[in-house]
């Protein structure tokens, strides 16, 4: 075995770390499950540590795995920068771009995308604005914003706004490391309804939750509502309640170092869809077209 892990094996590791499933990682990368399993095992053998804890709920990162994941992300960012810095971007794009983002996008999706765009198009002045979904829609239609990256599943002005889907983030149940639901072979919303629920309200997450709870004919036992993802994370990790949130905002540890597990629900829960949006009646500037073109190749 080579002393230096290949980028291919590191990509296998990252796919498993992001999905918590070897099967899903194999589907995402279009390779065999055995290739994923072998690649991850060889990395663990070389490092001499376990990067994952194998559980009935999937592949959970250990503390060493969490640290290694951050380092692997930095490796791929460095590779992207190396290629970007050597590419000759023609034609030269100048001007400005007013880009609006929703809260979740700003914290969990935007930074790497913006960094890549700024490296590729250094002569474009990028102006960023965080706003609510309603303010973003109004800003796109009025011309205040030229583009937006936002949750696009609940647009009011869908007939007037064009959308380009960028990524889907599955929603799963978050529980503490010792929660009784972890021992269940199957968990549905009926099971969740028996436990105190922590409801996230930012980016209309509570409205999205209300829709799938209503379709099930059930009601969550809401203990606390908050706009803070970190508050949800800490309350869940300490066993105060459970929550259903997307993988995009999932992290396996709370701020005080307590473990958070996530469980695939047995019922269909809509994924969180993030997309690029712009006014249908207004032509895009060269800077906006460059940003739109880059998002089509940006990895989710």
Image: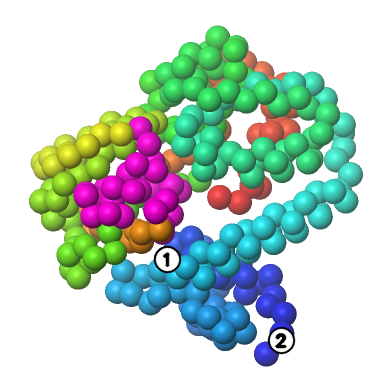
Across and down, in percent, residue 182 comes to 23, 66
Dot 1 and dot 2 residues touching (CB under 8 Å)? no
90 sits left or right of 260 in the view: right
Residue 136 picture location, percent across and down: 49, 20
Residue 51 is covered by the magenta coloring? no
- Residue designated by label 2: 2
Q: Is residue 13 visible?
A: yes
Q: Earlier in the sequence, mark 1 or mark 2?
A: 2
230 part of magenta stretch: yes
Rendered view: 273 above or below 124: below
Residue at the image point whose x is 58% and y is 67% from the top: 68
Residue at left offset 32%, top offset 44%: 232
Report how far apart the C-alphas of labels 1 and 2 lie in the structure.
26 Å
- Graded by Cα atoms within 10 Å as few (under 14), some (14 to 19) or many (20 or more), the crowding at tag 1 reads many
Q: Is residue 136 above or below residue 78?
A: above
> 155 or 246, which is in the foreground?
246
Vertical placement of residue 237 versus 15, above or below: above
Residue 201 is left or right of residue 267, and the answer is: right
Q: Secondary structure at mark 1?
A: loop
User: On the image, numbered disc 1 is attached to which residue?
Assistant: 20
Q: Nearer the viewer, residue 33 or 115?
A: 115
- Determine the secondary structure under disc 2: loop
Between 152 and 73, the one lying in front of the other is 73
Q: Residues within 10 Å of mark 2 (few under 14, many from 20)?
A: few
What residue span does the magenta drawing correspond to?
227-256
């Amino acid at each position: 075995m080579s002393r230096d892990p290949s980028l291919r094996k590191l990509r296998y590791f990252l796919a498993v770390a992001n999905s918590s499933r070897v099967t899903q990682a194999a589907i995402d990368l279009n390779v065999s499950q055995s290739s994923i399993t072998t690649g991850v095992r060889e990395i663990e053998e070389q490092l001499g540590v376990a990067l994952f804890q194998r559980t009935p709920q999937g592949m959970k990162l250990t503390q060493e795995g969490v640290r290694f994941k951050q380092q692997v992300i930095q490796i791929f960012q460095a590779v992207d920068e190396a290629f970007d810095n050597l590419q000759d971007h023609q034609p030269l794009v100048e001007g400005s771009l007013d880009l609006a983002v929703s809260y979740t996008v700003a914290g969990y999706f935007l930074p790497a995308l913006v960094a890549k765009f700024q490296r590729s198009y250094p002569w474009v002045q990028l102006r960023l604005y965080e706003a609510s979904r309603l303010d973003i829609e109004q800003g796109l239609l009025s011309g205040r914003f030229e583009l937006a990256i936002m949750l696009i599943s609940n647009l009011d002005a869908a007939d007037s706004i064009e959308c380009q889907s960028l990524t889907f983030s599955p929603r799963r149940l978050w529980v503490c490391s010792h929660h009784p639901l972890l021992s269940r072979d199957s968990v549905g919303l009926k099971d969740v309804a028996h436990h105190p629920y922590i409801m996230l309200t930012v980016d209309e997450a509570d409205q999205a939750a209300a829709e799938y709870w209503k379709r099930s004919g059930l009601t969550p036992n809401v203990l606390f509502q908050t706009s803070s993802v970190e508050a949800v994370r800490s309350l869940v990790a300490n066993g105060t309640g459970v929550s259903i949130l997307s993988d995009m905002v999932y992290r396996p540890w709370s701020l005080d170092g307590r473990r958070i597990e996530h469980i695939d629900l047995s019922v269909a829960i809509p994924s969180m869809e993030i997309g690029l949006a712009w006014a249908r009646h207004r032509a895009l500037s060269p800077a906006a077209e460059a940003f739109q073109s880059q998002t089509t190749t940006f990895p989710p």
